[in-house]
Image: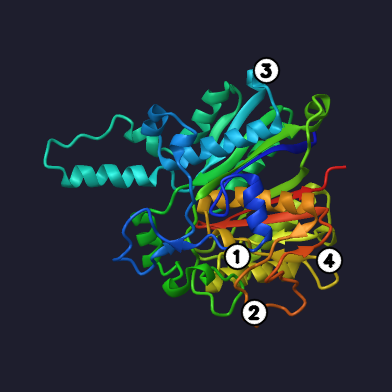
Amino acid sequence: MKRVVITGLGALTPLGNDVATFGKNLFEGKSGAGPITRFDPTLFKTKFACELKGFNAADFLDKADIRKTDPFTQYALVAADQAVKDSGLDFSKMDPFATGVIWGSGNGGMQTFEEQVKEYATGNFVPRFSPYFCPKIIVNIAAGLISMKYGLMGINYATVSACATSNTAIMDAFNYIRWGKAKVMITGGSEAPVTEASIGGFSSMKALSTRNDDAAAASRPFDVNRDGFVMGEGAGALVLEEYEHAKQRGATIYAELAGAAMTADAYHMTATHPEGLGAYMAMKFALEDAELNAGDVDYLNAHATSTPVGDLSEVAAIARLFTEKDNLAVSATKSMTGHLLGGAGAIEAIAGILSIKHSLVPPTINLSDRDPAIPGWMNIVSGKTIEKEVNVAMSNTFGFGGHNGIVVFKKFN
């Protein structure tokens, strides 16, 4: 099969609205959490989130495009544009049917759905939905609009696998290129879930942290006092390219996408398998796909959302695959970015790629009292970034419905 490399990155995150700013704040261990500004959270138990800062869609899109799109699509368009520009690709000189888009989102146009239904329910006039209502809320619209912007006429669809969505999209794009069905794919995920319905729904499940007195310290994966995740928003985009195509045009290559895999827990609607069986097998299969061993992995970006049960099931999976003899560093960047749901895997993939590029492992912040259930040998990087040569980085994502998606990147040689 053909080799697949990453030649472009784009990021719109609670830590920064481009890859450079995101990376800088990530490695400096900064928190993206703060009071919710999208709506009045007074009636909610959780009053904070990891929102984008200083982002104005009007700086990137015209008024017509903004009117026709939900924020999750706007985030996708901005991040994808960053990645395309970063790649240096000129699609006008390529076969349009050899280029495509696979983009994911867990919720799609939640904000649009809320606004339109409220207007319908409370309006003192003949109810009328916007003619853009349906195309604004559907999950696949981001992939479609990205393809239209660049004239990409090849493979085009969306993936939805809850919080494993981005890795699902990346894996599918990876496969189509290595099977020879595409030369270039834009992939990633976006989410705009800081809405009343999303915050309210996850809050009612007791999935969100309620540490309102100290939002910056609320996301604390692996800490014994963790009490739930912090909602995040944004997008991450990657340009995947067939190696010979990238080589021929002299592209800058960030890393190689070496392997990927998915499994299902087949266990519970929302809870992860208590022994991490599905997660373990997905990691194992991804390494087999990459033709690598557990001992080859230098950095694991854990899914670790800061929920009491979820973190430990992932720890069980990690402990089953790796041993204290392995040179593995683990960290949970959701401690800084919050949880972007369907967009999480994309920005965490970028975090892994930046770790390879800079020989740095970002920290798990807010880890002040490590859960004693975690094996003592497990090297969870906390507090500050460490310098470490990273030749192989693995990124874990798990989603409601029992979806497990793993991607493995390695230093390009």
Q: Earlier in the sequence, mark 2 or mark 4?
A: 4
Give the numbered dot on residue 327.
4
- Which residue is under mark 3? 95
Identify the residue at image location x=73%, y=50%. 354
Q: Name the amino acid, label 2.
A: Arg
- Alpha carbon separation for disc pair 1 and 2: 13 Å
Q: Answer with the quarter of the image where residue 404 lies.
A: bottom right
Crowding at dot 2, Cα within 10 Å, few <14 / some 14-19 / many 20+, comes out as some
First-in-chain label (1 vs 2): 1
Residue flagged by tag 1: what amino acid is it? Answer: Ala
Circle 4: element type: loop
Residue 408: give x, y in percent of width and height: 74, 50
Question: In the visual, does 389 lie left or right of 283?
Answer: right
- Three-letter residue code for mark 3: Asp
Most foreground residue, 72 or 286 = 72
| Residue projecting furthest to the right | 413
For label 2, the residue is 370
Secondary structure beneath label 2: loop
Name the residue type under label 4. Answer: Asn
Spatial CA distance of label 3 from label 4 is 43 Å
Q: Nearer the viewer, mark 1 or mark 2?
A: 2
Dividing the picture into quarters, in which one does residue 18 lie? top right
> What colour scheme governs how the chains and residues are painted in the rendered image of this protein?
rainbow
**Residue 171 image position (x, y, % from top left):** 66, 43
Distance between mark 2 and mark 3 Cα atoms: 52 Å
